[in-house]
Image (cartoon, rainbow, N blue to C red):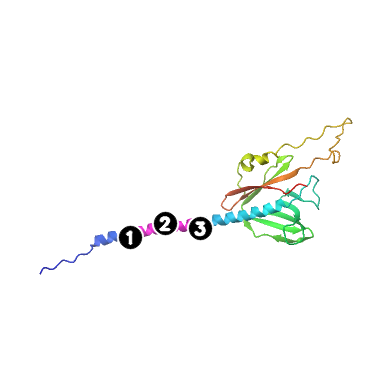
Amino acid sequence: MSKQKAQGFTLLEVLIALGIVSVISILSWQGLQEVLRSAGRVTAVDEQVQTVTAVFSQLEKDLAALELTLEGPTPEGDLIEVTGNGLLIQFTQRNTSEPAYRERVEWVLDGATLLRIARRPSNPDQASVSEPIATRGMQVRLLREPGGWSSPVVFGNHVVQERTDLELQGPALQLNTGTPTAQPPAGDDGENPGTPGTTTGQALQSLVRAVEISLTQPNNQVVTRVFLTGGVY
């Protein structure tokens, strides 16, 4: 009876098999790393979107609470203006469980963080400050009627984007961007007779109809939104 010769892999075959397994393992590991990196980027973007959405939601509430008039700003009246620190909004807060109260809100860019600082005129030393929001820069413009869009005011390291008003706001807001109303012609005595309801020679007040706010996020992405102000009384 003849003996069968034992069959096995040669050293060369084993080395080739190990090489193939190593290449497959490396490719699989690189693919897994890329999946993990992509998941991390998606999570970071999602967090930024949620943060910006929350900021814009609060801004919308603040601006919707305004009750503007054609009269000049007074300590008791509602107002909105761009200051050297950011955006200042003063209004009566009614969207709380508390009785209505006056509130002075400042949206300020402090370094690379955006803050909402709210104070009550009755207690100006006590401020309610929001959690710091990572923001590289901010740009603010006001739409006045009459007068049109004001020049943009930039804070921090904002990435300025060249866009036309029509592309950004749509045709609806374009209807409110006319030139300032001309002063009435002078009377027979050479003096300006003024406008009914205003003091002679007093400049006509303009209303802020909308606010454009652009935020530059930490990844240099710019998010822009236009908010309408509250009712005009």
Q: Which residue is mark 2?
A: 31
Disc 1 crowd, CA 10 A, few/some/many (<14, 14-19, 20+) = few
The answer to which of marks 3 and 1 sits earlier in the sequence is 1
Q: Which residue is mark 1?
A: 21
Disc 2 crowd, CA 10 A, few/some/many (<14, 14-19, 20+) = few
Residue 15 in view here: yes
Q: Residue at x 75, y 44 (%)?
A: 207
Tag shown at residue 232? none
Tell me how far mark 1 sits from mark 2, CA to CA. Answer: 15 Å
Q: Amino acid at mark 3?
A: Gly
Residue 98 in percent (x, y) is at 75, 62
Q: Which residue is mark 3?
A: 40
Q: Amino acid at mark 2?
A: Gly
Q: Secondary structure at mark 3?
A: helix
Tell me how far mark 3 sits from mark 1, CA to CA. Answer: 29 Å
Residue 167 in percent (x, y) is at 61, 40
User: What stretch of residues is rendered in magenta?
Assistant: 19-38
Q: Amino acid at mark 1?
A: Val
Q: Residue at x 55, y 55 (%)?
A: 46
Disc 3 crowd, CA 10 A, few/some/many (<14, 14-19, 20+) = few
Q: Secondary structure at mark 1?
A: helix
